[in-house]
Image (tube, helix red, strand yellow):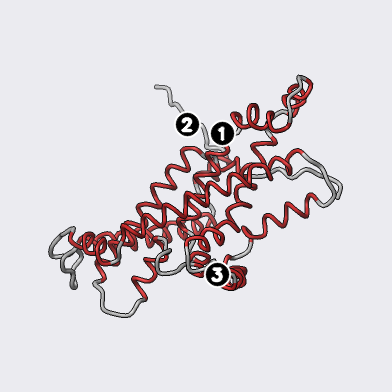
Amino acid sequence: MTLVSEKPTSAPARRRLVASPGSWLIWGAVAFFLVNLAGLIAAVVVNSFGSRWFDTWLPSGWTTEWYATAWTEFGLLNVMVVTLEVALLVVGISVLVGVPASYVLARRSFPGRRLVYLLFLLPILMPPITYGIPLATVLYKYGFAGHLTGVVLANLVPSIPFVILTMTPFIEQIDPAIERAARMCGAKTWQIFLRILAPLLVPGILAASILVLVRTVGMFELTFLAAGPDSQTLVVALYYSMSAAGIRAQQSVDAMAVLYTSSMLVLLVTALRFVNPTQLVARVKEDPD
């Protein structure tokens, strides 16, 4: 009888099988965070459908009445319309301003180019509340705040730089030789931009638009500081529903929170279908200032 001996496991294989204590701690912390996050979301969702819930794992009854109550009590139809108007206006203006600015930063070399690029990035890098209060003060001084115009202007401050950050890598990926060939054939700058670059930039413009849409719907600080009673978006209305005076059923507030979370989830999933996160990494060239 022939004995077949197993090949000894190599040292690298053994190290792969036995994870280091640091890896276990990191994965344990991630798992703990995800479990708590899932539990929090599940509690809100379950409570929004529960009729009564006292000292049990699940409610004693289920109903969708709280969603109807939230829809009428908080005027969600008007809130949804305002949210859509603000988001579409911010997306449209941001694309119209941000795409040409991205083209200039990607194609032109001029003194102070990197400084200008840094200034555009500051509203994204800084917390919105740090510049939101002075911005809201200026908007109230000139009569823009408290209306839809003020909310749109406040959200444009971080949205336009966000479009520039997103679109600059897309423009840099297009070969400049295409533009030079068009110029040799007699095309003007606006013709090159509209007939040649615009069709090539459609994926990037779509990606930037969806990301700005998600950011605008989820923006709380700037919208809260500039909004009035008739210009509140969904996230600001949710905050007021929780902090306003009076007695409100927690289930109706949770129903409103579920509607907000669901809308954000749909937007994020849609964005990830069109946007590759690696495309958002801008390549900064070494240009002389």
- Quadrant housing residue 22: bottom right
In 3D space, how far apart are the residues under numbered discs 2 and 3 (Cα atoms)?
Answer: 82 Å
Label 2–label 3 contact, CB within 8 A: no
Task: Give the percent coordinates (x, y) of residue 129.
Answer: 57, 69
Q: In the image, what residue occupies the spot 67% across and 42% down? A: 100
Three-letter residue code for mark 3 = Gly
Instruction: Say which residue label 1 marks.
Output: 202
Q: SS class of the residue under badge 2?
A: loop
Find the residue positioned furthest to the top: 185
At 51% from the left edge and 60% from the top edge, which residue is drawn? 149
Q: Which residue is mark 2?
A: 6
Q: Residue at x 69, y 33 (%)?
A: 190
Q: Which residue is mark 3?
A: 143
Depth order, front residue of 12/50: 50
Give the mark nearest the N terminus, 3 or 1.
Answer: 3
Proximity of marks 3 and 1: CB atoms separated by less than 8 Å: no
Quadrant containing the N terminus is top left
The single residue placed furthest to the front in the displayed view is: 143
In the image, which disc is placed on residue 50? none
- Inter-mark Cα distance, 1 to 2: 58 Å
Q: Residues within 10 Å of mark 3 (few under 14, many from 20)?
A: few
Does residue 64 lie above or below 146 as drawn? above
Label 2 vs 3, first from the N-terminus: 2
Q: Secondary structure at mark 1?
A: helix
Q: Nearer the viewer, residue 134 or 63?
A: 134
Residue lying furthest left = 61
Label 3: element kind: loop
Above or below 43: residue 188: above
Question: Residue placed at 63% from the left, 46% from the top?
Answer: 98
Q: Amino acid at mark 1?
A: Val
